[in-house]
Image (cartoon, rainbow, N blue to C red):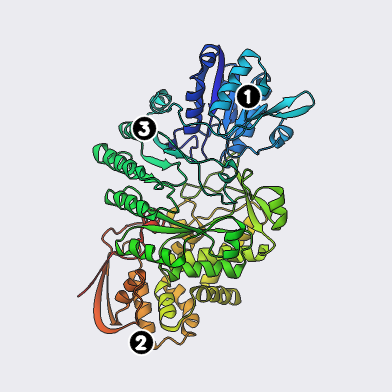
Amino acid sequence: MKNVYFVQVDVSAGLGEKNAYLPYTAGILAASAWQSEIVKREYEFKEFIFLREDVDSVVSRMDEPAAVAFSNYCWNTEYNKTLSKALKAKYPDCAVIFGGHNVPDDFSFLEEFPYIDYLVHGEGEEPLKKLLEALALNSDLNAVQNISFRSGSGYVRTQTECPRSLDVPSPYLDGWFDSLMESHPEMTFNAILETSRGCPNKCAYCDWGLLKSRVRLFSLERVRAEIEWMSSHKIAFVWGADANFGMFNRDLEIADALVEAKKKTGYPERMRMNYAKNNFENVFAIVKKFKECDFDRIGATLSFQSLSPTVLENIGRTNSDIDFYKNLLTKYNSENMKAYSELILGLPGETYESFIAGIGKLFEIGQHFVFEVYGCILLPNSAMGQKDYVEKFGIKTVKTEITRVHVYQEEFSIPEYNMIITETNTMSRDMWVRSCAFVNLTKAFHGHGFLRAFAIYLYVETGVPYEKFYDGIIDRLEANPGLFTSGLYFKMKEHAREQSVGAKVHKLTFEPCGDVIWEDNEILALNLLSNLDEFYADMEPYLRSFGIPNDIYGDLLAYQKNILRQPNDRERTVSLDYDVHGFLCGAYVNDLHPLKKKKHTLRMTDTDVQTNWPDFGKYVIWYGRMGRASYKNSVEEI
């Protein structure tokens, strides 16, 4: 019997971690391969390598491996290369097989890495099974579709095959993970739920695009059974692998099955889905179901990627009319349901001006709480990753290390990297750095709420565009480097500059929270909360420059300073001359009206006060940011 190992490590599953994802991709590949009578007869499955363990330790415990299959994405490819090199040095006859999204659709991995023997392109279940059969029988490799390998002095790419049906076994239901879980009783496990495969969209930045695959469905019976398995096996967190959950009406039934499973056993505790872009009624219904049992703390995704028509044309994407999104966001906010928006920085055709205008537009339509901006990763199997596309738009990338956040500071012995776009023919590297600074500043000042009341007031009452308001703050901080807030700003800017040139990026920590690593905007928020008076003193000359009447300025400032949650700050009482709270609540649901004079006193209460900075950082800054938790949650007139 020939011994086979499967490797799928996640960047979050370090050796000392107490939680990890079950290796779903490796599991479904193994389950599919062992359907073959030839594989059953010729091979013995030995182990899933799923933790980020020391490479030498992994190789030392392997037992004469005949083949090792590696699942590759950006978070584990460097680890896989290191492990496969060490493996090949000790076992030169072992067949090293690389597959997954991070394997380019060419011979480059074979050319650059002599310790890799075979590449599996696209969906791997059938090709890997056939490859193992061919290796066992020493038969013609050319008959195995969708693989690449060396042959004599050259390279061979076999015939490309269209994706097959999803009549493949489930690693959960067939028991492939049972012994793994039993051997790690100390660990909490997360899992992947795949109910469909494929995407109808062809966005240039996404590596689904080149697969050109129609959307195919796993049977509803299988999906229900997997959910029951996850519930009975106490899976803590489930990540939905679908590209467009909610696209089909049956997804409502799947959502019901998840909710019922949680009600029955308490598991899964949490769920995260990638929601459909064009079936908003289903998505709204699903998010509402999940809200009622506190299943999804992030909520619905209203993805834009860009609000520039030029950019959307360049990336092959069409967004719905902006008024449609405005009405949808109003509906979510009116029912206190979570929704967040996504943009991508670095897309071809984007300028600094169009990018910040896009963020301003999000605020205009009512997205005042949570928006995410992702750096544009150049994926090897995306349309954007192809040579002609790169040349057409002047795309330049840097290799930047993936940084884990919300964990204690540590160094991986084998860092992982992304190739991110930091320059195009419409956005210089300097403007990319300023864009990063603008993102982090607005996520803290507006999303977390330090200046949200001022920004909304100026937009509603005087028509000051949101992007102009926040871009002006950058100009003030740049011109006054000695300010407390300027020091924080320049640290953020330097962090972005490090990324822009591919330098080693320093980790951001906040001393009262220990060695936990934070995102830039989170570090900014934590530091501002610990020095609120100094921050608002820094901002006063800029805010006064807009000519806000003194009495209104005083009310806006008093509201802002007292509504913010802080450690050990349960209740504040504030007397105001204007209805600032009602004004803002109206704006959140796109009911814009002038600020009304109203002499009254507000009691602002934090009903879940955190007593120390570490807990505050975790539950308010990290978890809570997705749930509007930056403000005290109970406000009443007294």
Residue at image point 33% right, 63% down: 331
Nearer to the camera, 552 or 315: 315
Q: Which mark is residue 551?
A: 2
For the question of whether residue 504 can be seen, the reply is: yes
Nearer to the camera, 299 or 415: 299
Q: CA distance from mark 1 to mark 2?
A: 77 Å
Q: Would you identify the image quadrant in which residue 120 lies?
A: top right
Look at mark 1 in the image and give the residue it sits on: 144
Q: CA distance from mark 1 to mark 3?
A: 31 Å
Q: Quadrant of the N terminus?
A: top right
Dot 2 amino acid type? Asp
User: Which sits earlier in the primary sequence, circle 3 or circle 2?
Assistant: 3
Q: Position of residue 154 (x, y in %)?
A: 78, 28
Look at mark 3 in the image and give the residue it sits on: 226
Nearer to the camera, 450 or 117: 117
Q: Would you identify the image quadrant in which residue 426 lies?
A: bottom right
Q: How many marks?
A: 3
Q: Position of residue 334 (x, y in %)?
A: 31, 64
Query: Relative to residue 425, is residue 574 drawn left or right?
Result: left
Q: Position of residue 433 (x, y in %)?
A: 62, 63
Residue at image point 29% right, 59% down: 609
User: Which sits earlier in the primary sequence, circle 1 or circle 3?
Assistant: 1
User: Which sits earlier in the primary sequence, circle 1 or circle 2?
Assistant: 1
Mark 2 falls on what kind of element? helix
Mark 3 or 2: in front is 3
Question: As drawn, which residue projects farthest toward the right?
Answer: 153
Residues under numbered marks 3 and 2 in contact, where contact means CB atoms less than 8 Å apart:
no
